[in-house]
Image: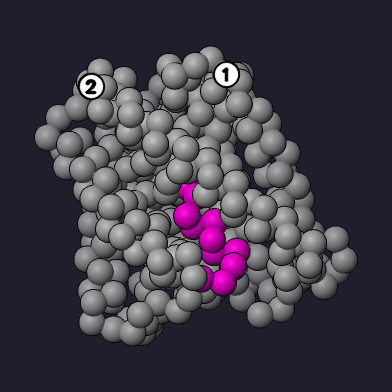
């Protein structure tokens, strides 16, 4: 990759890893529909791993050669929220590798947890010390919060107390941020088209919250039901806006569609496995088909944009 393109390599590109790894986990978690799905999940995990380390190398080069651009991204009201996509990618890979290699899984979880905690604290300090206009707030602000809720999914295997700690932090901050973000949607200017796909990020916290909470307590209770059905309702609302999303020009932000859809697919599959209700089995099939189709489209659009040099260019 030429120097000018490395200089403009966006931190948001790590959302690609989240989308692909989330899909890999979704296929593994739906292996009750057929063992072939698990093999697809394993294959996607390896693909996501290769792309992740490639992105890490490219971004390290950017840090070394263009540190001023990296600092600018880290102090940007929108881009700064995408730095935790690096640690979240590690956390998701740790979940995907759980059934492949548990030593690699633990290493990725350990590194991802420490890195995410550092990002979370640093970003919270930045939010507290920075003066923001309400128009700067958008669903990407949920990304640091989502990461803390992901940690217990694998972390419950290592520490119950640590899992509760991160789940508590994530769920309380999600409630606070959701109130602020929803206020911004209703009473202020609509999101620009470039950021419109980030609406789908709204699905991730309650969907991941359901998975994480259910893993911690080992059953579905009232809070679990609340999180699950709220995530499902948000899906219905967003799909009711389908005409708006279809007419959007392609941006790298389209990857915001992917991981939230992975999350709700996994949540539905988990609910089917715990309840045995045929309705959720059918819903799992539908969700997996929709998620796979959308991620396939976004991947092809991204490859086309890269080939046309429309990505990694100066904004």
Q: Which of the image's four quarters has the N terminus?
A: bottom right
Residue assigned mark 2: 277
Residue 36, label in figure: 1
Q: Is residue 236 visible?
A: yes
Residue found at x 37% / y 74%: 137
Residue found at x 22% / y 66%: 179
The reply, left or right, for residue 302 in relation to residue 108 is: right
Q: Is 69 placed above or below 264 here?
A: below
Q: Measured from the top left, where is residue 211 in percent x and y?
A: 32, 34
**Counting residues from the N terminus, which is met first, the one under dot 1 or under dot 2?**
1
What's the magenta region? 248-259
Q: How would you rate the neighbour count of disc 2 (Cα within 10 Å): few for under 14, some for 14-19, many for 20 or more?
A: few
Residue found at x 27% / y 47%: 231
Membership of 151 in magenta stretch: no
The reply, left or right, for residue 139 in relation to residue 43 is: left
Here the colouring is: one colour
């Amino acid at each position: 990759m030429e120097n000018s393109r490395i200089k403009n390599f966006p931190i948001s590109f790590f959302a690609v890893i989240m989308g692909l790894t989330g899909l890999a986990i979704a296929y593994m978690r739906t292996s009750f529909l057929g063992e072939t799905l698990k093999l697809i999940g394993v294959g996607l995990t390896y693909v996501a791993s290769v792309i992740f380390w490639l992105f890490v190398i490219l971004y390290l080069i950017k840090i070394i050669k263009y540190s001023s651009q990296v600092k600018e991204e880290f102090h940007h009201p929108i881009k700064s929220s995408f730095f935790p996509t690096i640690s979240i990618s590690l956390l998701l890979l740790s979940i995907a590798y759980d059934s492949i290699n548990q030593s690699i899984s633990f290493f990725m979880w350990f590194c991802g947890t420490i890195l995410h905690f550092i990002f979370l604290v640093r970003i919270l300090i930045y939010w507290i010390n920075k003066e923001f206009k309400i128009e700067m707030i958008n669903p990407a602000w949920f990304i640091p919060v989502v990461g803390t809720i992901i940690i217990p999914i694998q972390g419950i295997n290592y520490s119950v107390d640590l899992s509760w700690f991160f789940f508590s932090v994530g769920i309380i901050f999600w409630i606070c941020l959701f109130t602020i973000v929803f206020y911004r949607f209703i009473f202020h200017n609509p999101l620009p088209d470039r950021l419109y796909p980030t609406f789908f990020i709204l699905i991730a916290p309650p969907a991941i919250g359901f998975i994480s909470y259910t893993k911690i307590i080992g059953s579905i209770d009232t809070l679990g039901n609340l999180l699950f059905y709220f995530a499902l309702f948000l899906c219905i609302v967003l799909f009711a806006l389908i005409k708006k999303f279809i007419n959007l020009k392609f941006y790298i932000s389209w990857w915001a569609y992917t991981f939230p859809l992975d999350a709700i697919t996994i949540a539905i599959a988990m609910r089917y496995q715990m309840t045995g209700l045929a309705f959720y089995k059918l819903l799992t099939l539908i969700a997996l088909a929709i998620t796979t189709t959308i991620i396939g489209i976004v991947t092809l659009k991204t490859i086309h944009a890269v080939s046309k040099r429309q990505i990694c260019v100066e904004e």
